[in-house]
Image (cartoon, rainbow, N blue to C red):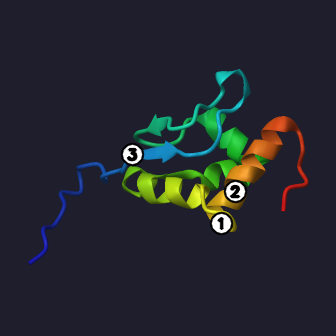
Amino acid sequence: MSKKRDKKTLPEIDSVVYCGPNLPGGSLAQFTVFQGGIPPHVKKMVEKTPAIGALIVPIKGLSNTRKKINEQGTKENLLYRQAKAHMRGDEDVV
């Protein structure tokens, strides 16, 4: 038996957290939590560097993502290195 939602209520939006490296000038700090959507300035960063967006995960996935960031060869490890390289201005991370 499923509950029907009242159409007047807003959909539930899970909180998300950024798991990538700290970005320069305090523009985005590691483990920043967003509720109700991603702010426009972060969306612009994601447009320039998709790896940043891929490192924004639901809070319930934080622990698993942190583990994978530290495991050599995982997708999350590569994304983290790409975000870090972009921060340094080096785009040639594979």
Q: Are marks 1 and 3 in contact (CB under 8 Å)?
A: no
Q: On the picture, is 70 further left or further right than 59?
A: right
Q: Nearer the viewer, residue 65 or 71?
A: 71
Q: Residue at x 81, y 45 (%)?
A: 85
Q: Secondary structure at mark 3?
A: loop
Q: Is residue 60 left or right of residue 53?
A: left
Residue at image coords 67%, 63%? 72
Q: Which is more N-terminal, label 3 or label 2?
A: 3
Q: From the image, state whether disc 2 or disc 3 is nearer to you.
A: 2
Query: Do the numbered discs 1 and 2 sit on residues whose CB atoms are within 8 Å?
Result: yes
Camera-side mark, 1 or 3: 1
Q: Report which residue position mark 1 lands on.
A: 75
Q: Which residue is mark 2?
A: 79
Task: Residue at 81% x, 43% y: name it.
Answer: 86
Q: Amino acid at mark 1?
A: Lys
- Distance from label 2 to label 3 (Cα)? 21 Å
How many C-alpha atoms fall within 10 Å of the one at disc 3: few (<14), some, or many (≥20)? some
Tell me the quarter of the picture where residue 71 sits: bottom right
Q: Percent from the top left, x then y, of residue 34? A: 45, 38
Q: Badge 2, how many Cα within 10 Å: few under 14, some, many 20+? A: many
Binning the other alpha carbons within 10 Å of mark 1 as few (below 14), some (14 to 19) or many (20 upward) gives: some
Residue 62 image position (x, y, % from top left): 44, 52
> Which x, y percent locates residue 1?
8, 78
> In which quadrant will I find the C terminus?
bottom right
Circle 1 — which element? helix
Query: Which residue has dot 3 on it?
Result: 15
- The three-letter code of the residue at mark 3 reads Ser
How many callouts does the rendering have?
Answer: 3
Q: Residue at x 59, y 52 (%)?
A: 55
Upstream in the sequence, badge 1 or badge 3?
3
